[in-house]
Amino acid sequence: MATFLHRIGRGAFAHRWLILLLWAVVLGVAGAAAAGSSGSGNTNITLPGIEAQKANDLLAEKLPAANADGASARVVVRAPHGEKLTGSGPRAEVTALLKDLKDSSPRIASVVDPYAARTVSADGTTGYAQVTYKAKSTDLTDADHRHFDDALDTARDKGLTVEASGNALAPAESSTSSEAVGFLLAAVILVVTFGSFAAAGMPLLTAVIGVGITLSSVTALAATLDLNSSTSALASMLGIAVGIDYALFIVSRYRSERQAGHDAREAAARANGTAGSAVVFAGLTVVIALVGLAVVNLPVLTAMGMAAAGAVIVAVLVAVTLVPALLAFAPERALGRRRTTGNRRPRTKPALADRWAAFVLRRPWQVLLVSAVSLIVVALPTAKLALGLPDDGSKPPASTERKAYDMLAESFGPGFNGPLTVVVSDSEPATAKQAVGELTGAIEDMKDVAAVAPAVYNPAGDTAMIAVVPKSAPASEATKDLVHAIRDQAEDTRAGTGAEGLVTGTTAMNIDIAAKFTDAVVPYLALVVGLAFLVLILVFRSLLVPLKAALGFLLSVLAAFGVMVAIFQWGWFKDLFGVETTGPLNSLVPILTVGIVFGLAMDYQVFLVSRIREAHVHGATPSNAITEGFRHSGKVVTAAALIMTGVFGGFVGGEDTMIKSLGLGLAAAVLFDAFVVRMTLVPAVLALLGHRAWSLPGWLDRRLPHVDIEGEKLAGTAPGAHEPATAEADFTPTR
């Protein structure tokens, strides 16, 4: 690996213009493909195998009109204060609104009159009109959305309160403020770390190119692959973070190799062979973890994992090809002002990394206990983790969807926003009708049921659909209990009649998916931890070091879960983080956090511990090896962690609740893993283990292939190969 990447680094350095041109062409092609695509994602989540999905599939087969896949919107209208919709003035204005809605797009199939459909509240103040389209939500144009909004605004100007919800609404405009905050913080950290604008600019430029390619590709494929609307935000978040960090590692190693006496081309090649090997390995672990999301068997999660994995792959390819080429454009300026060992001022006191390593080595037991107990305390709220899927009630209070949700809950009851659909089917129409009668009567007697609509049959009479409105809100425990109660009753009815009864609807779907995710978190976590253990055995040729790394990763993830539960579920410090609505965490967040943090944790593990192992292999004592590893890698790992924290933390200011919670969880996990686990627990445990940390049974050592992460095969191939590089030479700020 190291030798191969060494050759790539030399070639990229020599042919810098060609490499730059190739990446520019790739970016241009991806951008052109994105420009020619609708680029719209959806917000629907489906999961094969769960009861709600089975019911939807049955409806699609037996009652296709009831399961139409066209876009839809629900327009909620409220009369001016003191008036009723049944009055002549408001009624005329509502009628005009319905006409404007019908004329807003040729794709509209129908607009249901609330007076004819009797969808006006009992007090006469509020009603709603159902708007359905002939096209899918992803096929609606900007003109469709604009004319729809214009119709609502016209009605508002006449004094009506009008809000809307549904997938026919224009998707929220993505803000670049999150990415801008991350880039700004990263730029400041890089300039301080390198003391060179040229060196700081290279990771930023490569990240921009990598993320540009990834986002353009996701946009081009969004409509074709029916990608979720959060996919691009996740790919952007991860692409920026790893894109900057991977380039950072290679540039810092280049500076180290120059201080070791190599010329610019050889230094770039060696940086690519050593740090580049670690980048490839670290990227591979992230990709494996993200692709592993497919084991949950949720198509939208699989797609998000694949898109994020694609962002990482692009970041790795850009890092090991474009970074050496960029170094060729500014081989000296990348070093900063003080470029040579001779220009260094005499050191008057040990570096911070040396002092920290010495502190940990003096008190390994105390450091280990304090760090581990602190993470366990932070992780305690994880025991109360609750998962769910967002609905309009979890959106910002200022959004039209949330306002429509609240208006319906006030006028029609909290359960109106989450109706349930019971599907009854049997090959014999008579049996189906008997089962419908028994099941309807039983449901009407349940205490949390507000209303049960008459059954609607298909033309064959063998399948019926029953609409049930709960008394409680969609996300409440009472509604969850009601879904289970109806399903239990359906089983009893099936035992007596043989007819199948299934419960679906958005609320039931959310309950089923949340349950599926809750069941999947622990197995996926075990899979990822086990993978970490096996891969690190291969890299470090040790059993205890991988075990320590896997347990440290587990502590980091659980502590991050604890932070998310405390803030987003319990509401602690919610105003500080701009959390407007508390509730269960989005079901996608924990598993995505596990997959992403696993890869990032392996980044820090590899870049820090590989330097410690390198010193150990060359004969250093356990204590000296730890100090040497911190001297070379401590500052770059710190900078990388701060950059990732800044990038992820920047997304906390976004509107999307899922991205907000995921950004905060990842930022917390990076801080815990980098500073508490890798920079504190790792040296403490290695100090206590001593030489035993690097032991491996002989039979296993003989069977494992050798992975040259440290670039040992490059040693001695050029002058200065054995000269040590110092952390101070790597990172001397410009004065």
Image (cartoon, rainbow, N blue to C red):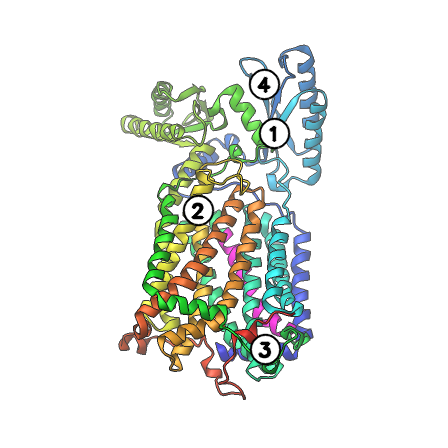
Query: Would residue 644 appear left or right of 188 to someone viewing this image?
Result: left
Separation (CA) of disc 2 from disc 3: 43 Å
* Residue numbers of the magenta segment: 304-326
Q: Amino acid at mark 3?
A: Arg
Residue under circle 2?
563
Along the line of sight, the residue nearer the viewer: 508 or 403: 403
| Foreground: disc 2 or disc 3 | 3
Q: Position of residue 127 (x, y in %)?
A: 58, 19
Among the two numbered marks 2 and 3 on one chain, the one whose residue lies closer to the N terminus: 3
| Foreground: disc 1 or disc 2 | 2
Separation (CA) of disc 3 from disc 4: 77 Å
Q: Position of residue 148 (x, y in %)?
A: 68, 31
Q: Residues within 10 Å of mark 4 (few under 14, many from 20)?
A: many
| Foreground: disc 2 or disc 4 | 2
Residue under circle 4?
126
Residue under circle 3?
345
Residue under circle 1?
164
Please name the residue shown 61% across and 62% down the image.
Answer: 207
Q: Residues within 10 Å of mark 3 (few under 14, many from 20)?
A: few
Please name the residue shown 52% across and 40% down the image.
Answer: 44
